[in-house]
Image: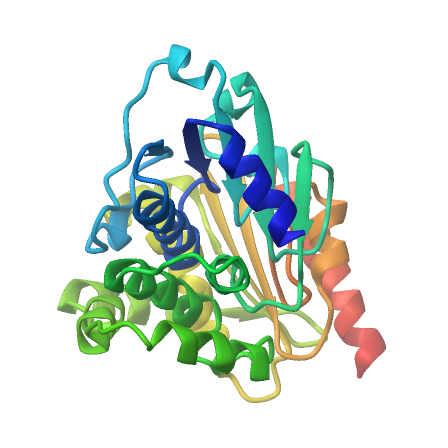
């Protein structure tokens, strides 16, 4: 399949790389890394990266997205990374491209592109992109390796999550053949300013529990605005505050927005992905998400998670 994707790349002079909205380190790392690999190996091609703002990951080099006209998609190849559902793709204009490719490591939800590569054995999409480059004999640059490594460590929790495998470390070793500063990555990823530490403390005090020990936080739109933090920092950023509670195997963070309630679901034990899919989302077995219409629907999801926890007791 890697060679099939390489053949698609060889056929097009313009390549536009997409990823999911509200990007995390893996979405950006795989997107930036692939761009740099293609620029290094095919300097005659025009390569673009598009999508919404990098926000807290804007420290990553080349994270500023291109602003391109619709006409750029004419005769172009669009590559979609780290995305399991069409609704999650940042910049829906990928449909204007002459041909589309998707590379992803999430559980398959729906067909998105003309050429599909979904491999859930990878801890990150960045790891998948690195494997693609390695298998196809493409040259890496130090910055491409650094970008991909950033994606790998964010999606593997610094190699702590059980998605980490021997394959993960083999790919990491491959990336380390290039010289880059890991201290710079970790400093930007994990150093917290006092305001964020204080915000975490506030969210810890909001944690509640269902009858069968599902931990959850529900943040109303009014409360979210009052924090002064962006939606990503509250939703994806605060779900981890419940991760280390003894006796808790499922936890979920609900965040109201103007467009619905963001649901970040995690588990250390159960496959919670089917519940995310039931509510229009997707992701991994133990880390998934969805957006539901309102608090009532969010509480139905919570009830489903509670039943899962009850069965497992």
Quarter of the image with the C terminus is bottom right
Q: Residue lying farthest top? A: 71
Q: Percent x, y for residue 216?
A: 55, 64
Residue 267 location, quadrant = bottom right
Q: Nearer the viewer, residue 262 or 121?
A: 121
Q: Tell me which corner region of the image, top left, top right, bottom left or bottom right, holds residue 86.
A: top right
Left or right: 263 in relation to 256 = right
Horizontal side, residue 245 vs residue 189: left or right: right
Query: Looking at the image, which is closer to me, 9 or 70?
Result: 9
Q: Residue at x 34, y 14 (%)?
A: 69
Residue drawn at x 69%, y 65% as measured from the top left: 285
Towards the viewer: 242 or 103: 103
x, y percent for residue 95: 57, 21
When the figure is inspected, residue 35 is found, relative to residue 11, above or below; the finding is below
Residue that appears at 32% across and 33% down: 44
Tell me if I can see residue 294 in this picture: no
- For the residue pair 51 and 132, the one nearer the viewer reads as 132
Q: Is residue 310 visible?
A: yes
Q: Is residue 207 above or below residue 22?
A: below
Residue occupying the point 29% across, 65% down: 146
Which x, y percent locates residue 284? Answer: 64, 61
- Residue at the limit of the structure toward the left, as seen here: 194
In the image, residue 35 sits, relative to residue 13, either above or below, namely below
Q: Position of residue 223 (x, y in %)?
A: 35, 47
Question: How many labels, in total?
Answer: 0
């Amino acid at each position: 399949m890697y060679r099939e994707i390489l053949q698609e790349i060889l056929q097009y002079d313009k390549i536009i790389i997409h990823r999911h909205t509200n990007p995390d380190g893996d979405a950006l790392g795989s997107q930036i890394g692939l761009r740099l690999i293609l620029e290094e190996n095919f300097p005659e091609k025009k390569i673009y990266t598009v999508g919404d703002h990098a926000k807290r990951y804007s420290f990553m080099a080349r994270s500023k997205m291109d602003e391109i006209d619709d006409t750029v998609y004419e005769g172009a190849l669009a590559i979609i990374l780290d995305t399991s559902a069409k609704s999650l793709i940042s910049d829906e204009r990928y449909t204007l491209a002459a041909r589309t490719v998707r590379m992803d490591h999430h559980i398959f939800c729906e067909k998105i592109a003309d050429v599909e590569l979904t491999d859930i054995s990878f801890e990150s999409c960045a790891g998948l992109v690195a494997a693609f480059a390695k298998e196809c004999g493409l040259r890496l640059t130090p910055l491409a390796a650094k970008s991909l490594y950033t994606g790998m460590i964010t999606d593997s929790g610094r190699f702590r999550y059980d998605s980490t495998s021997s394959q993960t470390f083999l790919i990491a070793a491959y990336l380390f053949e290039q010289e880059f500063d890991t201290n710079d990555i970790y400093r930007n990823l994990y150093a917290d300013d006092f305001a964020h530490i204080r915000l975490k403390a506030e969210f810890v005090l909001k944690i509640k529990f269902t009858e069968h020990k599902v931990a959850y936080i529900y943040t109303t739109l009014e409360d979210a605005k009052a924090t002064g933090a962006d939606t990503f920092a509250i939703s994806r950023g605060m779900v981890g505050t419940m991760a280390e509670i003894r006796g808790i195997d499922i936890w979920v963070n609900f965040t109201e927005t103007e467009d619905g309630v963001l649901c970040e679901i995690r588990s250390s034990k159960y496959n919670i992905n089917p519940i995310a899919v039931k509510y229009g989302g997707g992701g991994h077995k133990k880390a998934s998400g969805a957006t539901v219409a309102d608090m009532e629907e969010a509480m139905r999801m919570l009830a489903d998670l509670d039943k899962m926890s009850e069965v497992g007791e």
